[in-house]
Amino acid sequence: MPTSTDTDHVIRLDSVSMLYPTKSGGTVQALDDVSLSVRAGEFISIVGPSGCGKSTLLRIIMGLSRQTSGQVTFGPSDDTHRNQLGMVFQQPLLLPWRTVRKNLLTSPDLHQRRDAGTHAKADELLVMLGLEEFGDRYPNELSGGMQQRVGIGRALMHDPRILLMDEPFGALDAMTRDQMGLDLLKIWDQDRKTVLFVTHSIPEAVLLADRVVVMTPRPGRLADVVEVALPRPRRLENINTPEFGEIVLKIRKLLDSEHSAH
Ligand SMILES: Nc1ncnc2c1ncn2[C@@H]1O[C@H](COP(=O)(O)OP(=O)(O)OP(=O)(O)O)[C@@H](O)[C@H]1O
C-alpha cells in the first residue's frame, strides 16, 4: 500500500476506481479504490476471479483506458513516459504475412526509426527467446508457445522499463506454460524490469512473483498483497515444497472468503 514516505516506487496507484457505462444506461464498477505501490524491478502477479478488474487495471496503467477517479503516477520522479511501458496480451496479435523478425521490427510500441540498432535488438531478442532459427519463418509455422515468445519480443523491442502482461500464457497447454514461466524468469533476471503479470493460476502467480496481488470482484477490490519470500532462482520443484503450498493456500483462502462473502 502506498504511504506518504514511499519514494522508491516505479508505479503508484492511489485510490483508483473505474466505472464503465452499461448499455442499459447504468454503470459497472470494475475497480473500487485500488491503491498499490510497485518498486523498481519487482515481479508482481495479479490473481482474482473473472471480472474482478485485472485487465482494466493493466489498461489504465498502460494508458489505454482512463480511470474514473484516483491517480496513477510513475516514479521515482514521475519521469516514466508511457512509452517506457510494454504490454503482452493473451493472444500475441502477430501479423501473419510478416516473418518473425519483421513482426519484431513492426512492433506497435516501436516509435523510433528502424536503424541498425533496431535490427541488432531484434537479433538479440531472437536469441534471448530461443527463436534464432525462426527469424525468417511466418507465425503460422510456429507453435503457440513460440508465437507468444514473439509477442513478448515485440513488447521488449523498445526496451520498456515496465512490462505489463495480461494472461500471457492463458492460451497455452500446461507443459508449455510451465516452461514459458521459467523462461520469462530468466529473461526478467537479465535486467530486472518491473513486471505486472495477470494470471488465473495461483501456483503460476506464486512461482513467478515477489508479491501476489489478490483481487476480488464486484466491485474489483484489492483483497490483500501476499509476499512470496521464496529464494531465487525459482524452479518447478519449488511447487512441491511446504513453503510454496502455504502461500498458495493463503491466497486460496483469501479468494474463497471473499467469494463466500458475496
Ligand atoms: N469496455 C467495457 N465496457 C463495459 N464494461 C466493461 C468493459 N471492460 C470491462 N468491463 C467490465 O468490467 C469488469 C472488469 O472487467 P475486466 O476485463 O477488467 O476483468 P478481468 O478480471 O480482467 O476478467 P477476466 O479474468 O475474465 O479477463 C467486468 O464486469 C466487465 O464486464
Image: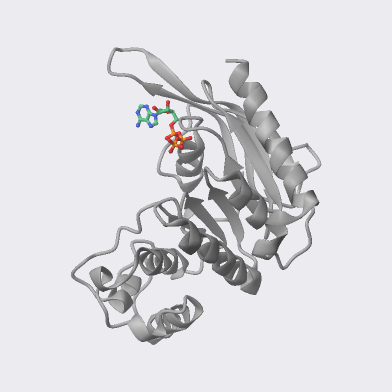
The quadrant of the picture occupied by the N terminus is top right
Is 8 above or below relative to 221?
below
Between 21 and 115, the residue placed more toward the observer is 21
Is 86 above or below relative to 6?
below
Q: 22 left or right of 200?
A: left
The x and y percentages for residue 180 are 51, 64
In the image, what residue occupies the spot 70% across and 33% down?
224
- Where is ligand 1, by quadrant? top left
The x and y percentages for residue 188 are 61, 67
The quadrant of the picture occupied by the C terminus is top right
Q: Tell me how many marks there are.
A: 0
Instruction: Write down the quadrant of residue 173 in the picture.
Output: bottom left
Q: 150 left or right of 232?
A: left
Is 233 above or below relative to 254?
below
Instruction: Write down the quadrant of residue 17 in the picture.
Output: top right
Q: Residue reaching furthest top? A: 25
Q: Residue reaching furthest left? A: 97
The x and y percentages for residue 139 are 27, 69
Q: 164 left or right of 226?
A: left
In the image, what residue occupies the spot 46% across and 30% down?
51
Residue 1 visible (yes or no): no
Between 118 and 255, the residue placed more toward the observer is 255
Q: Residue reaching furthest front? A: 240
- Colour option used: one colour
Residue 144 visible (yes or no): yes
In the image, what residue occupies the spot 61% across and 63% down?
193
The x and y percentages for residue 242 are 79, 50
Is 149 above or below relative to 167?
below
Q: 225 left or right of 243?
A: left
